[in-house]
Image (spheres, helix red, strand yellow):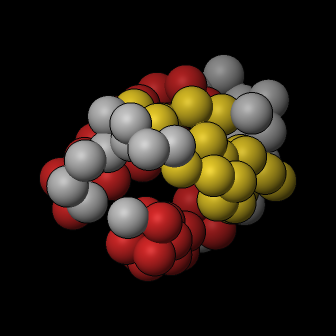
Amino acid sequence: MEELVRKAIEDVRPSLQADGGDVKFISVTEDGKVSVQLQGACNGCPMAQLTLKQGIEKYLKETVPGVSSVVSV
């Protein structure tokens, strides 16, 4: 699952980078909890939680079977 998550994160990175932000993969647990680190403009942005849940988490759940949630560390 980790390799699929890494690939999916690479798919969403360009849209974040276009706005001056970025996301870094940290880990994924056996129960599908993905940890990421928001970077650049995303770090501390008021919309970061929305980006995390409605953007990154939604995409990962759609493309990687077994992803249960995405959290920022």
Whether residue 23 appears in this view of the structure is no
Question: Where is residue 61 drawn, in percent x and y?
Answer: 25, 47
Q: Residue at x 54, y 49 (%)?
A: 28
Question: Where is residue 25 drawn, in percent x and y?
Answer: 64, 59
| 23 in relation to 72, above or below | below
Whether residue 50 appears in this view of the structure is yes
Question: Where is residue 14 drawn, in percent x and y?
Answer: 53, 74
Number of numbered discs visible in the structure rendering: 0
The quadrant of the image that shows the N terminus is: bottom left
Q: Nearer the viewer, residue 55 or 32?
A: 32
| 32 in relation to 11, above or below | above
Based on the displayed image, in which of its 4 quarters is residue 32 positioned? top left
The quadrant of the image that shows the C terminus is: top right
Horizontal side of 69 relative to 36 (left or right) equals: left
Question: Where is residue 35 drawn, in percent x and y?
Answer: 61, 42
| 42 in relation to 14, above or below | above
Based on the displayed image, in which of its 4 quarters is residue 31 positioned? top left
| 9 in relation to 10, above or below | above
Horizontal side of 23 relative to 66 (left or right) equals: right
Q: Residue at x 64, y 68 (%)?
A: 17
Q: Residue at x 57, y 31 (%)?
A: 71
Q: Residue at x 55, y 25 (%)?
A: 49
